[in-house]
Image: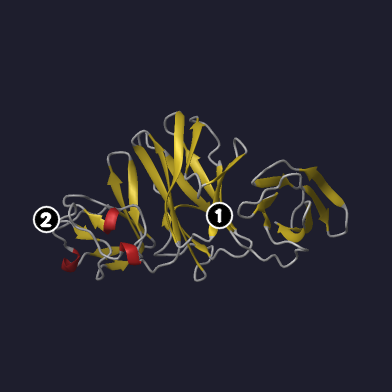
Amino acid sequence: MVANPFPCPIDWDQGGWTKTNIDGTIYVWKDGSNYITRNSNGLGSLPNGIVPVGQGFFVRTMAASPSLTIPKLARVQSSAAYSKPGGETYEGPPYAVFQVGKEEQTDEVWLTFSDEFTDDYEEGWDAVKRFGDGNAPQLYAHNNNYDLSIAAISEIGNDGKVIQFNFEARVPGEHSILLKEQKYLDEFDILLEDLNLNNIQDMNSAPEYSFNALLNDNPDRFLIHFNPKILGIEDTELSSDLIIYSWNKDVYIKAVGDKSLLNAKIQIFDIYGRRLDFRKTDNSLMVKIPVNVSNSYLIVKVVRESSIVVKKVFVQ
């Protein structure tokens, strides 16, 4: 824990902070319930990166003999009145903010995407989750064995991207997850999948998802799907209005735009031509099909009245 040494607020985003063996994220305790964060690149739930006067904060050490120097240039006049310019001219990588809430208690996860990121820990971008106390719900991304409040993830490709969200209720009852904000992600469908209830919701058209939770529920409850709204599928015959991909041990088929999977016939084959699954669908936005294979390519064929789509996917 570090104390604000000045009789005024300080700005984490201001250059000149000297960090030795310290990660690039600051954690501020809020309202006796949860932490708010800010990484080294201006993303996170701490408004404007401002630490109020008299407020201590936490940083994460990365090795022995850590040190932190706060420059005088970090001082600002008022945390209440201080607002940074550039909110409408943000030029960083795309990001999305998800907020879970129960009554007045909230928690947030920030996701950001770039071809400069890997799926390993990105110092200065990723922020390890610090768990709050009391009644505040806990939401965090689980990526490459890290639990994260801010997750820097490799670029969303033509096959989309799936992010695992873990959730822990501290008080049983109704909660909600809100797509609070997104930047430069208009070309993607953002879908929330509730694994407990087998529900999928389009967060672009309905940005708030309500659900009930118990104290001992499995935390591995949610998946967030980012799918291109328009996609030319290399293996497709006659049509490109479907997105087909795999995640974990499931194959997903999603209709693009205002299309649906009404009366579609879906078949899944292994590379030897053996049929592993066949089903007909109703008027669904997305179909999820579990497959009992590992480290294998599968062929997915979707037949509708006006189109036939064939896609090869890899199941890890």
Q: Residue at x 56, y 63 (%)?
A: 156
Q: Is residue 164 left or right of residue 65?
A: right
Q: Which one is nearer the viewer's eye here, 260 or 17?
A: 260
What is the quadrant of residue 77 in the picture?
bottom left
Residue 117 image point, x, y percent = 50, 67
What is the quadrant of residue 263 in the picture?
top right
The amino acid beneath tag 2 is: Pro
Q: Residue furthest left?
A: 7
Q: Which one is nearer the viewer's eye here, 293 or 209?
A: 209
Q: Is residue 168 left or right of residue 285?
A: left
Closer to the camera: disc 1 or disc 2?
1
Q: Secondary structure at mark 1?
A: strand
Decide if residue 132 is in sight here.
Answer: no
Residue 169 image point, x, y percent = 45, 35
Q: Which residue is mark 1?
A: 189
Which of the two discs, 1 and 2, labels the residue nearer the N terminus? 2
Q: Which residue is mark 2?
A: 7
Q: Secondary structure at mark 2?
A: loop
Q: Is residue 51 left or right of residue 103?
A: left
